[in-house]
Amino acid sequence: MTDSVSDLIACPKCDVLHKLPQLEKGAQAKCVRCGTVLMAPRDGAMTRIVMLSITALILMIAAVFFPFLELSVKGLGRKSSVFDAILAFSEGLMLPLSFAVAALIVVLPVTRFLALIYVFAPMALGWAPARQAREVFKLAEAIRPWAMAEVFIIGVAVALVKVAGLAQVTLGPAFWAFVGLVIITVLKDNFMCRVTVWQTLNARSQS
């Protein structure tokens, strides 16, 4: 046991308390009850997270403004982008839905990418954390469940299965940009060890 609460970590799944271990890069600490990975520091993780976040921002721009798909029926075709889909709900009683779609699919993911770059870029260069870095990282973690780009692409894939029987569907570059965005997001979160991030932020803020 330890007398300091700051030396304890709770398992996010079963709430068992553990004493923070000292891990080498590449090692893992798992919950003794359920086996959930508690810590998994990786060498060069901050640099990779910054690069992946920048890549995700570029893909997001392409995903929003490039043609997402084209529907063709009896010789008539129509291209549509995610931006067009957002504007389609921008009138009358559907306006709140337009704001919700824009926030969950575009605004919140972009905000999280920018927040992660702000937090990790200075530390990846060996500098002290940026001002309010801890608060910005808290924000990035708070909006993480609401950044639903991956949910959007899954919903689109399900809808395309039904639409394909009614019209010819051609996937545009924005669709593949969204697919790449989802893969990049998964990789970025896989590189991130949140306990190590907090330890680094606290240690470098005090130095």
Image (spheres, helix red, strand yellow):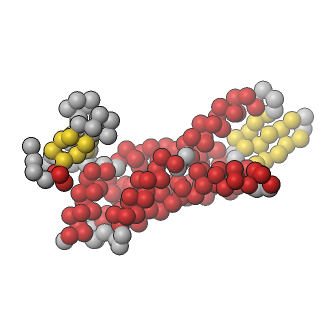
Quadrant of the rendered structure where residue 34 is? top left
Q: Position of residue 202 (x, y in %)?
A: 24, 63
Q: Is residue 168 left or right of residue 16?
A: right
Q: Residue at x 69, y 33 (%)?
A: 159
Residue nearer the viewer, 82 or 167:
82
Query: So how many labels did they put on this image?
Result: 0
Q: Quadrant of the C terminus?
A: bottom left
Quadrant of the rendered structure where residue 158 is? top right
Q: Residue at x 37, y 44 (%)?
A: 190
Q: Is residue 121 left or right of residue 205?
A: right
Q: Is residue 120 left or right of residue 207?
A: right
Q: Residue at x 80, y 54 (%)?
A: 92
Name above or below for residue 173 compared with residue 118: above
| Residue 26 visible | no
| Residue 11 visible | yes
Quadrant of the rendered structure where residue 205 is? bottom left
- Which residue occupies the extreme top position in the image? 165
Q: Position of residue 169 (x, y in %)?
A: 76, 36
Q: Position of residue 95 (x, y in %)?
A: 74, 55
Q: Residue at x 56, y 54 (%)?
A: 59
Name above or below for residue 196 compared with residue 162: below
Q: Is residue 179 left or right of residue 132?
A: right
Q: Quadrant of the N terminus?
A: top left
